[in-house]
Image (cartoon, grey):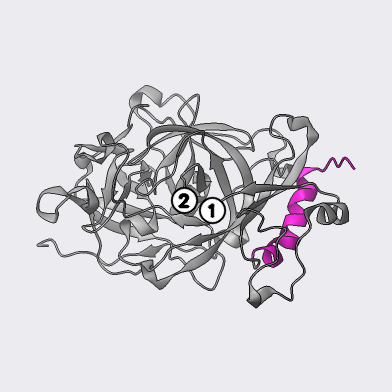
Amino acid sequence: MILLASFRKAYQVKQRLSAQLLKRRGIHGIGIGLCDPNRPKKGAAIILYASALAATAKSSKRSAKRKPLHPVRLQRKTGVPIRIVRSTSFHKHGSPSIPHSHRFRTRIRPVIAGYSIGTPLASGTAGLIVARGNCGKSRYILSNNHVLVNENTRRCSLTLQPGGADGGTVSKDRVGQVHRFVRLSKQRNNYMDAAMAKPLRRSLLSTRYAVFGAVPGHLRSYRIGDRLKKVGRTTGVTTGRVESIHTDIRVGYGSYGNLGTISFKNQSVIRGKRPVSLAGDSGSVWLTRKGNRAAAVNFAGSADGFLSISYPIEWFMQVFGTRVPISPHHRKQRRLLPPRRGVKRSYLFTKPLPPKLLRTIRPIRANRCPNDI
């Protein structure tokens, strides 16, 4: 039986099945992608990220009474193809031990995107330098909550470059402190792992992005199949393709903030041909292959690193009221690309946060650190 489903229908079915399927042991995420990545015209499919055979095998004793999942029966019932992608569970990628790339864990001044950043105890990646205010004179470092924040709390948290896991020390490498962040929740669905640090002085930051240079703006939306690139503290220069969007997923945070495993809604999964998201790459920002426009923020991934869990950078800009600073060379260019025609009605594309949801995601101001630390 050949099914040809629209992305809208696939999204509606995903919304209906998500909570039920994510309770099953071995199923880590459910999103929307292509039925056949090699033949895009075959339409949409529901993508299940699952451990080997988890989608068809019976679960543990705890869920033994639950009927096993039969993808073929499910797609006949819903009218949407089901594609199972084998994957390990997903975890935040901070606090690295052994790096793959040494280049981007070194000290650099001024600080630019793509290099190690963090706290005295851990390291992640400085994803992008962003600006606030009409004049854009206030500059900040964009990264993740679990990279910059002290255990998901408002407590004072110093920002070092390089981060503590890369030898950064408070006395020599302090560049700022966490300014605002979105608190992660154990009870509610999360949409972003996000924070920004305020520098001690503006001259410590440069708007450049490692290797790729200037970033002239950001995308409001991107679509399934788009090719992206980034620089991360651990994996260095990598490329990937958007495999699924609108993906509901479970991400393990371990002991960080006593969170354990928490839920995220409508994330993007980006696949690389080699590892693109390993410990220390958290906070890195995906750019478009052409034009260097910021697209998505990486914060987690699969154990082997081939899958990056990211959210649209447009969400960060909406929540924090920020934008990409424009260098004099790029001032004549638009700061962001408008959505492509039909994006508002197309579930093939990511979407900005709707106003009602945006009002519920409030960034928290962190406590200021004493100057004499």
Mark 2 to mark 1: distance in Å?
A: 6 Å
Residue for badge 1: 88
- Residue placed at 12% from the left, 62% from the top? 373
Q: Residue 200's spot in the image, x, y percent?
A: 19, 50
Visible residue check, residue 192: no
Q: Residue 146's spot in the image, x, y percent?
A: 37, 59
Q: Is residue 7 magenta?
A: yes
Visible residue check, residue 51: yes
Q: Secondary structure at mark 1?
A: loop
Residue 65: which disc?
none
Left/right placement of residue 167 relative to residue 290 reads left
The disc labelled 1 sits on which kind of residue? Thr
- Residue placed at 37% from the left, 26% from the top? 212
Q: Is residue 12 magenta?
A: yes
- Residue placed at 25% from the left, 66% from the top? 156
The disc labelled 2 sits on which kind of residue? Ala
Chain part drawn in magenta: 1-22
Q: Secondary structure at mark 2?
A: loop
Placement of 248 over or under 215, stated as above or below: below
Q: For the residues labelled 2 and 1, say whether their Cβ atoms are less than 8 Å apart.
A: yes
Crowding near pointer 2: few (<14 within 10 Å), some, many (20+)? some
Residue 303: which disc?
2
Placement of 239 over or under 265, stated as above or below: above
Name, please, the residue furthest toward the right: 1
- Residue placed at 53% from the left, 57% from the top? 89
